[in-house]
Image: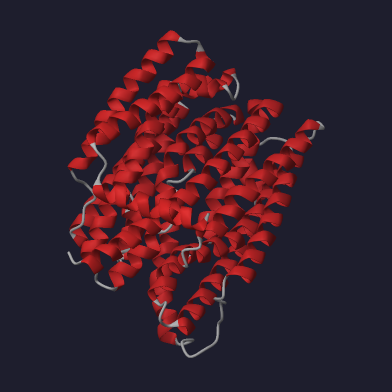
Amino acid sequence: MTDEAGESRLRSLVSIARGASLYTVGKILSDVGEFVLHLLVSRFLGAGLYGLFAYGKTLAFTALLLTNLGSDTSILKYIPQYEDEPSKRRFLLGLAWLTSFLGAVVVSTLLFVFAPTVASLTLEEPGFVAILRLFAGILFLDTLANLLYATFRAVELIEYEVLADRVIKPVLRVVAVGSVLLVGASVYSVVVAMVVASAVTLFVAIAFFLNRLSIRPTLRGPHATRETVTEYYNYSLPLTAKEAGTVMQGRIDVLIVGIFLSSTAVGVYNVSVLVSSLLYVPLLAFNQLFPPIAARLYANDERADLAAIYRATTRWIFTVSLVIGIFAVVFRAEILTLFGPEFTAGTLVLTLFVVSQLFNCATGPSDSLLMMTDHQYVVMANEWVFGIANVVLNVVLIQQYGFIGAAVASAGVLAVRNLTKVAEVWHFERLHPYSRSFLKPLFAGAVAALGMLAVDALLPSLPAVALGAVVGTVVYAGVLFSFGIEPVDRQAYEEVAGARDSAD
């Protein structure tokens, strides 16, 4: 490998690491805000009303997958791919924005109009229709904001997405929701407060876009041709169908729990899923800038760099997520007790989802790699096959085993789906993300688990959680350092740290 090729690869890894570090800071703040938000609602309103809130929020989040119509991923692919053709990427950006805007109008309107029907089929509780209609407004606002966030990521200016979506919005939500709860407001007022937070965040994101980015979407120009439109929809339409399949996997389990069980069951189940989603943070973080970089490397036929970046990124994701997963399993009861004593019924649900999320993180950005290497139809087929399997298994197992059955179905499908994607990347591109360096975090995780279990056995609940987190992290990091730092990790860290020092 030439020095120039090595520097190019390092620059790509540094960009991914920089994006991940920025996103992680924002995600930590966002997750703390989300945790406090759910904690406030569950504590002030109880498991039943919290279940209504969580169910409506899940419906809006699920519908958000449909309103994108593949536009966010299309932006991540085409903006870097056509960086040397500014007029074409402006047109493709305009096409993506228009497509997603129309999708937001249609889906939000359908949710608003059919809210009574949805309520009658799921949670027939007083006031639930009004709550759903408010979430339809949040759905529309968040869809528009997501278009701006995807544009920031495509030009590798993730800091503006982080600031708007991961810092400002959660702070606004906690302040607004906390304020209305303190004066004794209802669950309806809680959702009104969230609408206000989403609207303010959208205006902030628009201001960032207008002041910080020079690219502007357009539907005119020399590339406004049938060929360009066909190229765009040949990529985005399979992704739209893919998102429909993703709906059947994402949070469909929560929706089916609401159909067959009570709002209290929804609340208990949702909190367990929420806690397990912390493991997803490293994957999301490193996947922020991986897609545009992978798209550029693939378009330039730089396969060696693409393979190296795929391996390093996957190992980073798994290394960070493993210690979080071990902590969540060891202290599962203590963590769930924070939401209220009734939520400890979800300990097995939490454990199952932690295991499935570890499978997810161990396969790295395989899904993004498939999409960036023009295998969008394969991704679409994956989502539909596993989506249908998830729905069928949830319906069958929930009726037999309650929300434990939902966890078995969804966690199992998630694990198998991600292993399948790794196999597909190997089949189509002859790339895989694994090396012997994966053994280091596995061994370190085993030693850290013993340390956490010892703390849990010796101390009462809350002190055990606090000290266990410290002991587990220190032991995990110590064992990893004793094995030695990978050269590429050291180089990437020095580059990122050097860039920060220069900025200071």
Q: Picture coordinates of residue 68 (x, y %)? A: 52, 62
Q: Does residue 458 lie above or below 45 as drawn?
A: above
Residue 287 can be seen, yes or no: no
The quarter in which the N terminus is drawn is bottom left
**What residue is at 71 percent from the left and 55 percent from the top?**
200
Colour mode?
A: secondary structure
In the image, what residue occupies the spot 21% across and 46% down? 434
Q: Quadrant of residue 112?
A: bottom right
Q: Residue furthest bottom?
A: 222
Q: Position of residue 423 (x, y in %)?
A: 22, 51
Front-most of residues 325 and 276: 325
Residue 8, horizontal then vertical, whole percent: 30, 65
Pick the residue in front: 447 or 475.
475
The answer to whether residue 136 is seen in the rendering is yes
Q: How many circles with numbers are drawn on the protein?
A: 0
Q: Residue at x 74, y 42 (%)?
A: 176
Q: Nearer the viewer, residue 226 or 162?
A: 162
Q: Is residue 113 above or below residue 224?
A: above
Give the residue at the far right of this rendering.
Answer: 183
**The quarter of the displayed image where residue 146 is located:** bottom right
Q: Is residue 410 left or right of residue 463?
A: left
Q: Position of residue 360 (x, y in %)?
A: 34, 43
* 165 sits left or right of 405 in the view: right
Residue at screen point 61% across, 39% down: 33
- For this view, does 343 lie left or right of residue 184? left
